[in-house]
Image (cartoon, grey):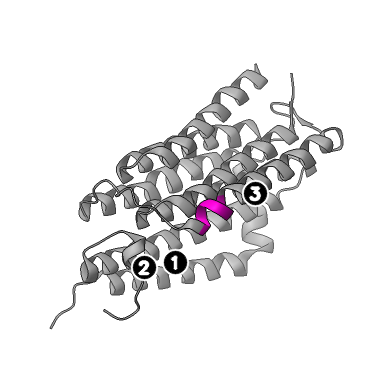
Amino acid sequence: MYLVLFFIFATFCVLGALNLLLQRHPINSALSLIVVMTSLAVLYLLLGAEFLAAAQVIVYSGAIMVLFTFVIMLLNAGEEERTRGSKAAYLVGFPGAAAILGLLTFVFLSEKTPLGAARLGDYLVSTGDLSKVLFKDLLLPFEVTSVLILIAILGAVALARKEQS
Amino acid sequence: MVVPIAYYLILSAILFSIGVAAFLIKRNIITVFMSIELMLNAVNLTFVAFAHQWHHVSGQIFVFFVMVVAAAEAAVGLAIIIAIFRTRNTLDVDQVNLMKL
């Protein structure tokens, strides 16, 4: 059952990512990216990361993708033109990406037994466990990220504001 | 029934490679930005898989911070995209090749 669930949502992930690559309209790409992120949330749940699954749905497929679709609609982005693109990207990019994939797959498959296996529910990180580490050992980095977010908000507003002249 | 951790890692390698390919061949600046998000998600899956393998919580803490930084990055990046569109009236990365207007 666990294996079946994994393969269903892994297939969703890969199909969504391929659809992002193949669609020409940015809104279609954005919607397929939402499929990828939501399926990844299910995979996090299968790995026992319940808080991260919720955060993935809320932050990624909620906030960030809403921002993306909002910008796509705000700018009225049409279909991208079929241009020749850069030669180097085609000549180096595809073989490079395929080489990375092949190498990583080979390494992971040859190390399959030492890497072990995941069983459903054998290691569940509750929100409490996570927050104990986050608010005790890592309190300073946590507070620094809030400053980072504040600066990001200010920067976004300053950049996207209309020039008054 | 168990799922080998290697399968999760291979899935994340597949997603990362698709993200690299989309980053290189897409011409729309928003789609290029979305493929960066796809790569970040692929790496997050690796972190969670290894956190599960080592039975250690710090992998998930990493993912939490990556999510926070990705949210900040998305806000700033989309603001830059809006600014580019306002000055050049295009989203095609091929036409955004001069620093001066």
Q: Is residue A55 magenta?
A: no
Mark 1: secondary structure: helix
**Chain of residue at mark 1:** A
Q: Residue at x 68, y 37 (%)?
A: B10
Which stretch appears magenta?
A88-93
From the top left corner, tell me how far across and down residue A148 is, in percent. 48, 70
| Residue that lies at the very extreme toward the left in this rendered image | A165
Amino acid, disc 2: Ile
The structure residue drawn at horizontal position 48% and vertical position 40%, both measured from the top left corner, is A37
Q: Nearer the viewer, residue B27 or B67?
A: B27
Crowd class of label 1 (few under 14; some 14 to 19; many from 20; radius 10 Å): some
Where is mark 3, residue-wise?
B60
Image spot of residue A143 (x, y percent): 54, 68
For the point 62% across and 51% down, the residue is A96
Is residue A131 at all visible to an observer of this figure? no
Mark 2: give few (<14), some (14-19) or many (20+) Cα within 10 Å: some
Q: Is residue A66 left or right of residue B44?
A: left
Real-space Cα distance between discs 2 and 3?
25 Å
B84 relative position to A141: left or right: left
Q: Label 2's element?
A: helix
Q: Which residue bears the numbered disc 1?
A: A149
